[in-house]
Image (cartoon, rainbow, N blue to C red):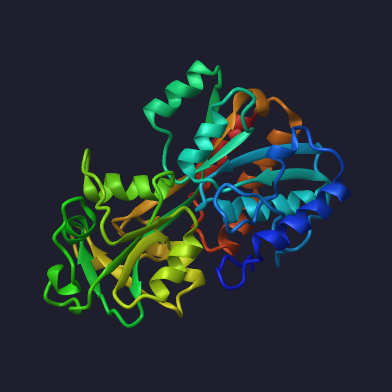
Amino acid sequence: MLSRQGTTRPTAVAMGLALTLALAACGGDKKDDAKSSASASATPGSTATAAPSSLPAASAAPAATGTVDGDGSSTVFPIMEGVAEELTKKGLKVTVGESGTGGGFKKFCAADGTDFSNASRAIKDDEKAICEKAGVEFEEFKIASDGLAIVSNKDFKVDCLSMEELKKTFEAGSTVKKGSDINADVPADDIKLFTPGADSGTYDFFAEAVLGKDVKYRADGVTTSEDDNVLVTGIEGTKGGLGFFGFSYFSENADKLNLVGVKGKGECVKPSAETVLDGSYPLSRPLYIYVNKASLARPEVKEMMKFVLGKEGRAIITEVQYVELPESDYEAGLAKLG
């Protein structure tokens, strides 16, 4: 299985050395060195070669070879990390960074921007406007489902929080200092909050789904990072630690953290493959890849997307513990490719 745990992922220095060797073996890149990466970096925005996978090697070469480059969501990154490795075996080099959903769109909507952008939320109107101004037209592809996991330190036993309790804890001006300030069932430890950074689509999703329009995050007592492994390590090592990130990252670290149920309009529900897919978990969301239409005209880019939406790509989605979409969604995506 592709590992994304902070304790097992290779360091950026080691991965940088691996990238140098990989580039030497694969030949020249289609863009400058600043954009070359087959990323498995633990540092947001940096790039390195994808980690080994237990998935079987591809059986045949693709119809096209070349280089496809992208950036974006750290949540979607493990999927595209696996895609990059499998397609490299076939002779098609895919490079990908993880600067966050917002950071990815900045690169995607620039002149001579990336071929694709991974996103854990839909593109915003202001980002669409920037793309339009730069002459970047794009296609949107849904590739998987994910749940946003609320987690706490193993010794800070929190069983369930309502959407209202999450809001009063994470919103600006919050008076919550101890767990018992949230509700009487939460331990009275001092709390320390951990959240993704402002360039993260997970940060945006939580803001929209929990805080509400125009409500800001609190800044006091909060540690932020674009790297979910930093959040895992912080919550694991801090009594009273409470935060959130993609459910698949919890799955990789389930022995280290406590998973908190979320109560929406009905009963309290914890995220799982079943509750994410059927929507009963209140913090479920789709994951996306946005592809530049001009890039999509290149056979290597189209080949990459056929792989992502096909059986081999969907095997990677489940391998890294995300949830497959209904068959009709993949069929709709493939129909866009012609």
Residue placed most toward the observer, 321 or 186 = 186
x then y, percent, for residue 231: 43, 64
Q: Quadrant of the C terminus?
A: top right
Asked whether the viewer can see residue 46, the reply is yes
Q: Quadrant of the N terminus?
A: bottom right
Residue occupying image coordinates x 39% and y 26%: 126
- In the image, taking residue 132 as reference, residue 270 lies left or right, namely left
x then y, percent, for residue 69: 68, 38
Asked whether the viewer can see residue 141, the reply is no
- Asked which quadrant contains residue 137, the reply is top right
- Residue furthest toward the front? 220
Residue occupying image coordinates x 87% and y 48%: 24
x then y, percent, for residue 115: 64, 33
- Residue furthest toward the bottom? 155
Residue occupying image coordinates x 36% and y 75%: 238
Q: How many marks?
A: 0
- In the image, taking residue 85 as reference, residue 128 lies left or right, namely left
Residue placed most toward the observer, 300 or 201 = 201
- In the image, taking residue 141 as reference, residue 243 lies left or right, namely left
Residue placed most toward the observer, 225 or 129 = 225
x then y, percent, for residue 104: 53, 39
**Vertical placement of 19 versus 182: above or below?**
above
- In the image, taking residue 162 as reference, residue 272 lies left or right, namely right
**Vertical placement of 230 versus 34: above or below?**
below
**Vertical placement of 205 versus 43: above or below?**
above
